[in-house]
Amino acid sequence: MDMSQNYFELFELPVAFDVDRDALAQRYRQLQQVVHPDRYASASESEQRIALQHATWVNEAFDTLKDPLRRAMYQLTLAGVDLNQETATTRDGTFLMAQMELREALSEVEQTSDPFASLDSLMRDIRQLLKQQLESLAAQLNDGSEEALKEAQEGVSKLQFLTKLQREAEAVEAKLEEAM
């Protein structure tokens, strides 16, 4: 197994934002049959260590390619775009204002007359925004031009905001369900 391959090569997929999830899962199962550490239980310590390294690499590649945010970040990295996560943020004021409004609405959900209906509506809005951002990101990454990659870098920051907001909404939902 050649650990110098990129994740797309490892999974025999084209470098593209949109991946065939069935092909990804099928190739993952094939690779696991080859590298799973249990297959090397009676092998030498060195072979066991190498098998573990390969299995870890395959798992990391699979987890990256199946997750849209991680896949976008990885694809940008392959294209040579520096994703400094310490300073990465969006400069889109309209987007940031919308995020503040969504967060405020989320913080007020529990005080509404029907928290579940309010949260459901908010979660639909968040899912729609995520869908739009993913579509935009796919177009930018598939374009691949320098300008499109810069826009994709901004898109990754927006996707991070939206993903975090979705997780927070899901946490509020769990809290509401526990209180029932």
Image (cartoon, rainbow, N blue to C red):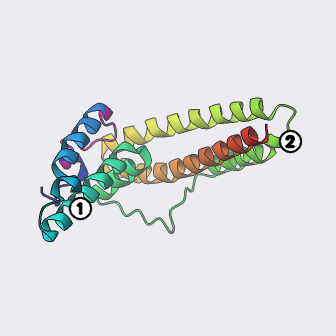
Q: Amino acid at mark 1?
A: Leu
Q: Quadrant of the C terminus?
A: top right
Query: Is residue 177 visible to the viewer in this orientation of the structure?
Result: yes
Q: Which residues are magenta?
A: 10-21
Q: Is residue 53 above or below residue 29?
A: below
Give the residue drawn at x 31%, y 40%: 142
The label nearer to you, 1 versus 2, is: 1
Front residue (pair 109, 55): 55
* Residue wearing tag 1: 52
Provide residue 131's location: percent of width, then percent of height. Answer: 51, 34
The image quadrant of residue 40 is: bottom left
Picture quarter containing residue 116? top right
Residue type of the residue flagged with mark 2: Gln
Q: Residues within 10 Å of mark 1 (few under 14, many from 20)?
A: some
Badge 2 crowding class, 10 Å Cα cut-off, few under 14, some 14 to 19, many 20 or more, is few
Left or right side of 15 for 135? right
Tell me if 25 is positioned left or right of 73 in this view. left
Q: Position of residue 135 (x, y in %)?
A: 44, 35
Q: Residue at x 16, y 70 (%)?
A: 45
Q: CA distance from mark 1 to mark 2?
A: 50 Å
Is residue 44 left or right of 32 when viewed as pictured?
left
Give the residue at mark 2. Answer: 111
The mark total stands at: 2
